[in-house]
Amino acid sequence: MTEEEEIFGDEIIFAAAKKNHISMLEEFYEQRKRANNFNPNLTDALGNTPLHYSATFNHYETSQRLLILGANPNFQNRAGETPLHRAVWYNHVNIATLLIENGGDVSITNNMKQNALGLAKSLDMKALIQSAQLAQKFSPDEFADDDEDEEEGTEKKPVTSNSSFHSDMIANDSDDE
């Protein structure tokens, strides 16, 4: 494949992303896979990837397929925007959810120092971004089961009260039933 053919061929993945043309995307993928040269993070002159376009135009299936094929949800274009920024700006909650579920980082800021929450317009989008911010703050290790750390043979301590109020609650708990 000549360089000119490759550049023209690259346009196919952008057209597929912009027009939500799954079969075109699949054909491009298969062709490049055979040549061992598939890159889902190709960029155009603006630094946009196909995922930027599928997110901008609210193309869920194409966005999903690009992510499966290895598209980076945190790739920043020349303006510092990620596909998540584009989805949030255009209020595509379903695309924003997909990107977040696939590693989209809500804390990344664009060149204007705006993160996803700063770009959110609707209450639904703001709630989604705030939930994602909270979830991304904590690593899964922070929620690990502490019981596994206990030595074998040690006995678990019973729950006890630490004030007279708590003592009264525990004592009266059986009376409520």
Image (cartoon, rainbow, N blue to C red):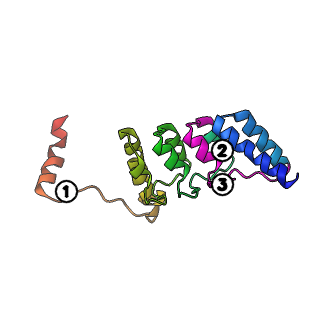
**Please, what secondary structure does the residue beneath circle 2 have?**
helix
Q: From the image, tell me which residue sits under label 3.
A: 45
Residue shown at the point (77%, 44%) measured from the top left: 29
In the image, residue 61 lies at what x, y percent?
62, 35
Write down the region rendered in magenta. Answer: 35-61
Q: Distance of mark 2 from mark 1, alpha carbons?
A: 54 Å
Dot 2: few (<14), some (14–19), or many (≥20) neighbours within 10 Å? many
Residue at horizontal 16%, vertical 53%? 166
Lower position in the chain sequence, tag 2 or tag 1: 2
Q: Position of residue 151 (x, y in %)?
A: 45, 66
Residues at marks 1 and 3, CA–CA distance in whole angstroms: 65 Å
Residue 175 falls left or right of residue 38: left
13 relative to 21, above or below = below
38 magenta-colored: yes
User: Disc 2 marks which residue?
Assistant: 66
- The x, y position of residue 107, in whole percent, is 45, 57
